[in-house]
Image: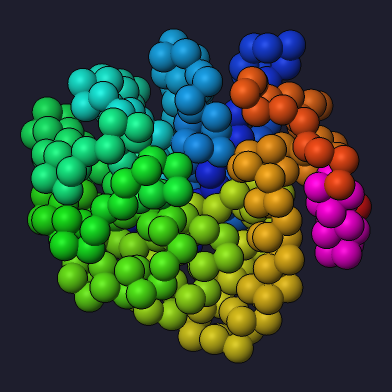
Amino acid sequence: MLKGALVALVTPFRDGQVDEETLRRLIEFHIENGTDGIVPCGTTGESPTLSHEEHKRVIQITVEQVNKRVPVVAGAGSNSTAEAIDLTQFAKRVGADAALIVTPYYNKPTQEGIFRHFQALAQECRFPLVPYNIAARTGVNIEPATMARIAELPEVIACKEASGNINQMAEIYNLCGDKMDLLSGDDNMVLPLLSIGGKGVISVLNNVLPREVAGVCQAWFDGQAELAKQRFLKILPLCKAMFVETNPIPVKTAMALLGMIPSGEMRLPLCEMAPANLEKLKAALKAYGIM
C-alpha cells in the first residue's frame, strides 16, 4: 500500500495560525510533482505544538484536498495511548488511509508497554497503522523483536524506521518484511534501506524536491540501481542540510527562501536558524542550483 516517496508535510503558519490556504496549495504541489503519499501532523508538521483542534483540522484539510489521489497517512501519535486512539479514530472517520503512530515519548515505556500501546490502537481503531520508531526524539527504541510482535497485528501495514541504524533495519526486515512495508524515516538512508528490501521513505527533503526524491525510489524499483545511486548522491548534501538544526527548522527556512511558503514561521520552542547554520543551508541550496 505504501511505496515510494511520501512527504513528511510541514504545517504552514501565518501570524500564529495554521495557514490553511498555503496548506492546500502545498498538497497540490506535491500531487502535481509525483509525491507518492502525504503525511501531515508528524514531527516535520510540528505536531507537538498543534492543539488537538488544529491537529484534527490539518488532517481533515489534507484528506479533503488529496481526495483519494494518493494515500494520506495521518500523524496520530501521542505518549498517551488514549489520546493516540482518539486521534487515530478521527483520522479514520474523516477518510485518511492510515495513521502514523510515533513511539510513546518521555514516559519511556518498556518493550512490553510499547507492544501493548500498538495492540490497544489496533483493537480499538481497526485501522491501518504505521509505527514510527525514532529513539533520538522519544527516548526509547522499538527493538526488532518487539517490532516483529507489532507486525503480527493485522492492522499494522508498514513501519517508519528512523533509528539511522542499517543493522537494525536489516534485522527488522528479516523478522517481518513479509508482514509489513519498511519505510525510511531518514532521507540519507533511503537508498541503503531500498537495497535491503525497503519500500520507500517518509521524507523531509521531499517538501523541497519531490520529483527528485521520488526519482531515487522509482529508479530503484525500475531496476536501475546505478541511476538510483546517482540520483541519491546528488541530493545527499541537501538531505544533510535539512538537519543542520532541529527538523523542521531548516526545511521551513529553505521553503521560505525559495518562495514555496509565504513565511518560515514556526512555533516556540522552535525558532529561527543561527546565522552560521543559515549560511550553510543557503550554500547547499546554491550548490544544488535551486537558489
In the drawing, does residue 106 fall left or right of residue 185? left
In the drawing, does residue 288 fall left or right of residue 250? right
Magenta highlight: main SS: helix
Q: Please give the name of the residue rendered at 18% of the width and 43% of the height, measured from the top-left corner.
A: 110
**Color scheme of the displayed model:** rainbow
Is residue 178 shown to the viewer in this render?
Answer: no
Question: 217 or 68: which is nearer to us?
Answer: 217
Percent x, y of residue 141 = 31, 52
- Magenta stretch holds residue 103: no
In the drawing, does residue 106 fall left or right of residue 155? right
Image: 169 above or below 62: below
In the drawing, does residue 142 fall left or right of residue 281? left
Percent x, y of residue 14 = 72, 16
- Magenta stretch holds residue 279: yes
Percent x, y of residue 119 = 11, 40
Percent x, y of residue 159 = 32, 54
Q: Please give the name of the residue rendered at 66% of the width and 51% of the height, measured from the top-left corner.
A: 243
Q: Please give the name of the residue rendered at 68% of the width and 25% of the height, measured from the top-left corner.
A: 266
Question: 42 or 143: which is nearer to us?
Answer: 143
Q: Which residues are magenta?
A: 277-290
Q: Please give the name of the residue rendered at 62% of the width and 17% of the height, measured from the top-left corner.
A: 18
Image: 268 above or below 107: above
> Which image quadrant is residue 1 in?
bottom left
